Amino acid sequence: MKRDDFVFSIGYQGDTALIDSRTARHYSKLSAAQLSEQGLFRAAFRMALYDDDRDSMKLVVDAYNRVSGAHLEGIDDMKRLLGVFSVPEGVTKVSRI
C-alpha cells in the first residue's frame, strides 16, 4: 500500500482501501507536523505510523492533547483512539471517493 493511500484512507472493503481523494489532493504534500497543525490528526498519525517515526507519532499525540484537552499518555493510547494499529496487509486495490 502506498504511503498517501494509507494516510488518507477512510476505511476498507475487503482488499480495497477507500481513499478520501479531496483531502489527499489538498494535503498530500504536508508533513505529519503540518497535518497536525491543520487538525488532521488521524492523517498525521497514519503518516508517522507508516514511516515508523516514533518522534512524529509523539508529536501528534502531544498536539492532539493540547487541542482537545485530552490526556492520552502515549502512542498506544492514540492507536486505540483512532483504531489504527499498523499498515494493513493484503490491500491490493484502491478506490478514490
Image (cartoon, helix red, strand yellow):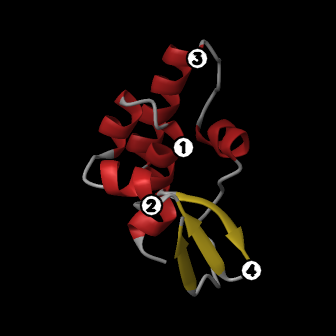
Of mark 4 and mark 1, the one earlier in the sequence is 4
* Residue under label 3: 68
Image-based side of 80 in relation to 9, left or right = right
Q: Badge 1, how many Cα within 10 Å: few under 14, some, many 20+? A: many
Query: What is the number of callouts on the image?
Result: 4
Kind of element beneath mark 4: loop
Whether residues under marks 3 and 4 lie with C-beta atoms below 8 angstroms apart, the answer is no
- Kindly identify the amino acid type of the residue bearing the numbered disc 4: Gly
Of mark 1 and mark 2, the one earlier in the sequence is 2
* Residue under label 1: 42
Q: Badge 4, how many Cα within 10 Å: few under 14, some, many 20+? A: few
Q: Is residue 47 visible?
A: yes
Q: Nearer the viewer, residue 59 or 26?
A: 26
- Kindly identify the amino acid type of the residue bearing the numbered disc 3: Ser
Of mark 1 and mark 3, the one earlier in the sequence is 1
Tell which tag, 1 or 2, sits nearer the viewer. 2
Image location (x, y in percent) of residue 73: 64, 27
Tell which tag, 2 or 4, sits nearer the viewer. 2
Q: CA distance from mark 3 to mark 4?
A: 33 Å
Image location (x, y in percent) of residue 84: 65, 53
Residue 14: assigned label: 4
- Kindly identify the amino acid type of the residue bearing the numbered disc 2: Ser
Of mark 2 and mark 4, the one earlier in the sequence is 4
Whether residues under marks 1 and 2 lie with C-beta atoms below 8 angstroms apart, the answer is no
- Kindly identify the amino acid type of the residue bearing the numbered disc 1: Arg
Tell which tag, 4 or 1, sits nearer the viewer. 4
Q: Quadrant of the C terminus?
A: bottom right
